[in-house]
Image (tube, rainbow, N blue to C red):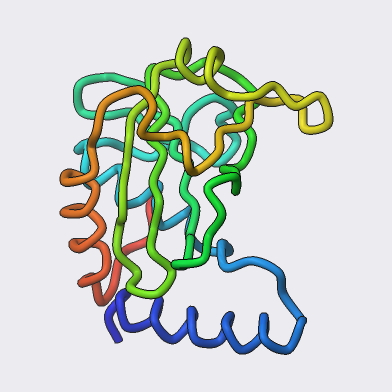
Amino acid sequence: MTVGQLLTLYADILTELRRRGLVRTKNAPLGDLAEYAAALAYGGLLAKNSEKSYDLTAADGRRIQVKARSVDRNASPSQTFSPIRTLGFDVTVFIIVDADTNSVKSAFEWSPTEVGTLGRWSEHTKGHVVRIGQIRAAGTDVTEMMQGAWAQLLDLVETVEPD
């Protein structure tokens, strides 16, 4: 099966588990897949999992933090991405994936300054929190680039494990 077919199957399973009240979100593998797609889009290399401030280094040397959220058509714009606890990156790319179609709806790059200024500080999570409804308020629109990389990811049948 292709990655796209697997994601569709996974989404169907999560929908049923949600209907049964067993799970509350649809985000499980999304973060890792978004990081992989961003590495494709930016021609970059994924950082080690233990890296605190960024997820990949782009071909141009920028350190990129990736935040992704799966949303359905009833999603509230007040839903948030996971908190950003450190600002030791060059840009954060926020990616919104349509849960019904498994496609990238929008993607924007924000600078650390934009995250620090526009993101709400949460004492509870000790990080800046950005709502899905606000990502278009700043930064650079990279939706088309991420849509292309996401489509490339969905067509993958098999990958090799990194060393």
Residue at x-position 56% and y-position 62%: 27
Left or right? Give the position of 31 relative to 62: right
114, 52: nearer the viewer: 114
Q: Is residue 43 above or below residue 4?
A: above
80, 1: nearer the viewer: 80
**How many numbered marks are there?**
0
Quadrant housing residue 157: bottom left
- Furthest-right residue in view? 124
Q: Is residue 71 above or below residue 50?
A: below
Residue at x-position 73% and y-position 89%: 20
The image quadrant where one finds the N terminus is bottom left
Answer yes or no: is residue 163 visible.
Answer: no
Left or right? Give the position of 26 relative to 20: left
Q: Position of residue 41 (x, y in %)?
A: 21, 43
Quadrant housing residue 81: top right
Answer yes or no: is residue 34 visible.
Answer: yes
Residue at x-position 54% and y-position 24%: 53
Q: Position of residue 115 (x, y in %)?
A: 51, 20
Residue at x-position 76% and y-position 81%: 22
Left or right? Give the position of 26 relative to 11: right
Q: Position of residue 96 (x, y in %)?
A: 40, 51
